[in-house]
């Protein structure tokens, strides 16, 4: 009844909406920055075991210094006390360099500052395949392998399952639908489990494909030969991941589409005599784009962590096995580096999603901004 | 005075397949509707009213087991058309439907105007501009300010949304509009507003309406004809005046007695018993179990008996032989 009075003239409404949208954006940015800060700090504290790792490091420095002095022929005839003093001097030099004499709390804040600026520092023990000790180099060297394998697997699973799910939801209850749905429990086993079987069958029983690695050794010369070799090495892990997640993914998307294709406005669109492809596009996919985009983007950043066991099974030089090794070695800078990059990626994705929601859904754009 | 017949429905049937068996939601419904006439279909919940609308518009759920009967719209035998031709030639352009629960009948992420104009653009290939102009026109017709064309559904109140859906039904100038409980979720004032808009549209545009409702009082506003549905069948079809003043079927009489009236001492009377379930309708008259006038012949399925020119009732009480023998 009072609808016409409640709504201000369009131009003023637009300005107000823009202002609200801006305030909303700034608020979201600050909140996300705080989230990253907290998560990185927590990682620093945990990866250093609240400072306990320093004690281990101190012991290690001392033994290394003692070893170096003992092994050096120049100091062979040095008297015991002098030698002891020399070791102490070396230890205190190293302690000073690493600032281990300062309390952990102080240094953790310092770490935090550097981590937030993406100065990831040097690894304790690990190094990249090219010999660099920079955490950044170590991580970046592994990144392409992970992105290639997990990116293609997840994209394949995502688009296949959305497409198949849409088709099945159209034929709900048909033999095809029931058959595919009956296969959903196959996803109870993880990818590496299928991987073991696939390696057994296709690498040993019928030796068609390589059992592991990313490229033949020695690597082929030509660019195309190299790509073909990588592709051959990718097939089995790709198949393993695809098998382990495709059916449950289809199942959940199908249920999602079924729920949304019985909305009243979809029925209405059917009554309106719209062709079915238009109904699917405009009345089923369009209103549900926000959740679809969300799961797509979260899937994409999920690639970052790789998959530890699958990479081990296929001997794939990705981030998963790197992290596994870093945790094993207690190489805190590498662990922290990986988490920092992930935190930033996650925050950026969430921010992107916030903006996409506003663009995709007028209810978020207009109502959310007003709140 | 009498307009030509627009819609002829004979033996319309719609059966659903369910886990418990076949549900005969619409079971042999027949009626005529003239141009510029409004037929009100009354009935209790679950008697098959909405299924009737769905059967006419071919908006069928997945579990349809059987459809049957003949529907003529003007000179077109609608039931003989294949789905694709029905969609292109009849659906929405000649026959439109305002569905129940039309609160959510609008796509939440598309502007209202676009949705109202959509049938014209898709079915008739009109330009966006031309279709939106027509949408603005029907907005005027149903009493919604054209400012709302560029709004999203969530920015409209319930009554406004209902009017927008009505506008959507009228946009392609259909000969027949089927309204399935168009006002049952709204407050009384909004209901009255919409009923008045419908009356005006009927007068000015010459549209025919089938109004499906359980609200006897509100529907009497618009009705030229009344059909009373019970357990998937029309038990009585009559002119509104005849139906409201002299209902013939026992169920009609009891229904009229159950309508509450303001400031009146007599208590509205409920009809004892429950409608039969539609899985396994009883043989013979379906109302017999609740009927105070039940007699031997009710064990046989009553035919549609003519009482007047356009008055049919499915009850043996009105059969010539019964009346001769009984009275």
Image (cartoon, rainbow, N blue to C red):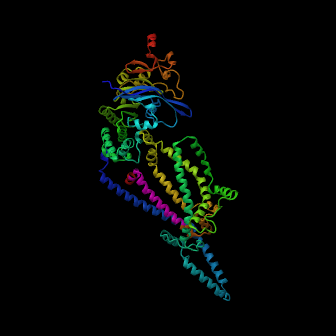
Question: Toward the viewer: A371 or B173?
Answer: B173
Q: Is residue A299 left or right of residue B202?
A: right
Residue A274 in the image, given as x and y percentages of width and height: 42, 41
Decide whether residue B215 is among the magenta residues.
no
Question: Toward the viewer: A35 or A352?
Answer: A352
Residue B204 in the image, given as x and y percentages of width and height: 29, 33
Image vertical order of residue B122 relative to residue A329, above or below: above
Magenta-colored segment: predominant secondary structure: helix
Image vertical order of residue A339 relative to residue A188, above or below: below
Quarter that holds the N terminus of chain B: top left
Q: Residue at x 36, y 21 (%)?
A: B242
Q: Quadrant of residue B181?
A: top left
Quarter that holds the C terminus of chain B: top left
Decide whether residue A360 is among the magenta residues.
yes
Image vertical order of residue B132 relative to residue A149, above or below: above
Q: Which residues lie in the magenta part? A: A338-365
Q: Quadrant of residue B219?
A: top left
> Taking the image as drawn, is residue A221 in sight?
yes
Q: Residue at x 60, y 53 (%)?
A: A243
Residue A149 in the image, given as x and y percentages of width and height: 57, 60
Question: Toward the viewer: B186 or B176?
Answer: B176
Residue B291 in the image, given as x and y percentages of width and height: 47, 20
Tally of marks:
0
Q: Is residue A47 left or right of residue A365?
A: right
> Taking the image as drawn, is residue A1 in sight?
no
């Amino acid at each position: 009844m009072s609808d016409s009075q409640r709504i201000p003239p369009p131009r003023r409404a637009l300005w107000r909406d823009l202002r609200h949208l801006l305030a909303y954006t700034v608020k979201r940015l600050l909140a996300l920055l705080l989230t990253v800060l907290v998560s990185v700090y927590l990682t620093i504290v945990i990866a250093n075991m609240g400072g306990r790792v320093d004690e281990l490091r101190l012991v290690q420095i001392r033994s290394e210094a003692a070893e170096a002095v003992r092994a050096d022929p120049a100091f062979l005839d040095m008297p015991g006390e002098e030698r002891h003093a020399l070791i102490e001097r070396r230890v205190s030099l190293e302690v000073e360099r690493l600032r281990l004499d300062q309390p952990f709390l102080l240094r953790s804040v310092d770490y935090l500052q550097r981590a937030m600026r993406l100065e990831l520092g040097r690894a304790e023990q690990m190094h990249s395949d090219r010999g660099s000790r920079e955490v950044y180099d170590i991580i970046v060297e592994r990144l392409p392998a992970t992105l290639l394998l997990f990116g293609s697997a997840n994209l394949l699973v995502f688009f296949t399952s959305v497409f198949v799910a849409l088709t099945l939801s159209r034929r709900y209850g048909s033999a095809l639908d029931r058959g595919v749905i009956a296969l959903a429990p196959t996803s109870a086993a993880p990818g590496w489990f299928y991987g073991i079987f696939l390696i057994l069958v296709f690498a040993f029983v019928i030796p068609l494909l390589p059992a592991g690695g990313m490229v033949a050794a020695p690597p082929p010369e030509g660019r195309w030969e190299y790509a073909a070799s990588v592709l051959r090495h990718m097939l089995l892990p790709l198949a393993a991941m695809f098998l382990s997640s495709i059916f449950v993914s289809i199942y959940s998307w199908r249920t999602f589409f079924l729920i949304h294709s019985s909305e009243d406005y979809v029925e209405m669109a059917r009554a309106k005599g719209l062709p079915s492809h238009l109904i699917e596009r405009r009345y089923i996919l369009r209103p549900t784009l926000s959740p679809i985009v969300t799961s797509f983007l979260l899937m994409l950043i999920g690639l970052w962590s790789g998959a530890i066991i699958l990479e081990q099974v296929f001997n794939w030089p990705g981030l998963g096995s790197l992290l596994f090794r870093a945790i094993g070695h207690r190489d805190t800078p590498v662990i922290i580096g990986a988490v920092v990059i992930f935190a930033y990626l996650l925050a950026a994705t969430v921010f992107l999603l916030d903006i996409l929601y506003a663009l995709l859904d007028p209810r978020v754009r207009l109502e959310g901004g007003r709140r | 005075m009498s307009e030509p017949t627009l819609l002829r429905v004979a033996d319309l049937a719609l059966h659903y397949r369910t886990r418990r068996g076949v549900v005969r939601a619409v079971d042999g419904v027949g009626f005529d509707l003239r141009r510029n006439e409004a037929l009100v279909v009354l009935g209790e919940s679950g008697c098959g009213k909405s299924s009737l609308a769905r059967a006419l518009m071919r908006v069928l759920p997945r579990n349809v087991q059987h459809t049957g009967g003949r529907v003529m719209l003007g000179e077109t035998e609608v039931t003989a058309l294949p789905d694709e031709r029905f969609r292109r030639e009849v659906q929405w352009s000649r026959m439109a439907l305002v569905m129940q629960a039309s609160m959510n009948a609008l796509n939440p992420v598309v502007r209202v105007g676009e949705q109202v104009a959509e049938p014209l653009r898709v079915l008739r290939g009109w330009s966006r501009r031309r279709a939106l102009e027509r949408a603005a026109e029907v907005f005027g017709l149903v009493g919604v300010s054209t400012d709302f064309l560029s709004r999203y559904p969530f920015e409209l109140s319930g009554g406004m949304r209902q009017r927008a859906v009505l506008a959507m039904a009228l946009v392609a100038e259909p000969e027949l509009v089927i309204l399935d409980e168009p006002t049952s979720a709204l407050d009384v004032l909004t209901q009255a507003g919409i009923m008045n808009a419908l009356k005006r549209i009927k007068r000015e545009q010459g549209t025919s309406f089938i109004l499906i409702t359980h609200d006897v009082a509100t529907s009497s506003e618009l009705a030229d004809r009344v059909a009373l549905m019970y357990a998937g069948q029309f038990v009585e079809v009559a002119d509104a005046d005849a139906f409201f003043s002299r209902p013939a079927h026992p169920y009609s009489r009891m229904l009229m007695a159950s309508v509450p009236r303001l400031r009146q001492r007599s208590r509205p009377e409920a009809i004892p018993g429950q409608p039969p379930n539609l899985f396994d309708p009883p043989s013979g008259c379906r109302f017999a179990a609740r009927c105070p006038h039940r007699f031997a012949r009710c064990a046989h399925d009553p035919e549609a008996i003519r009482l007047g020119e356009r008055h049919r009732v499915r009850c043996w009480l009105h059969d010539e032989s019964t009346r001769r023998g009984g009275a």
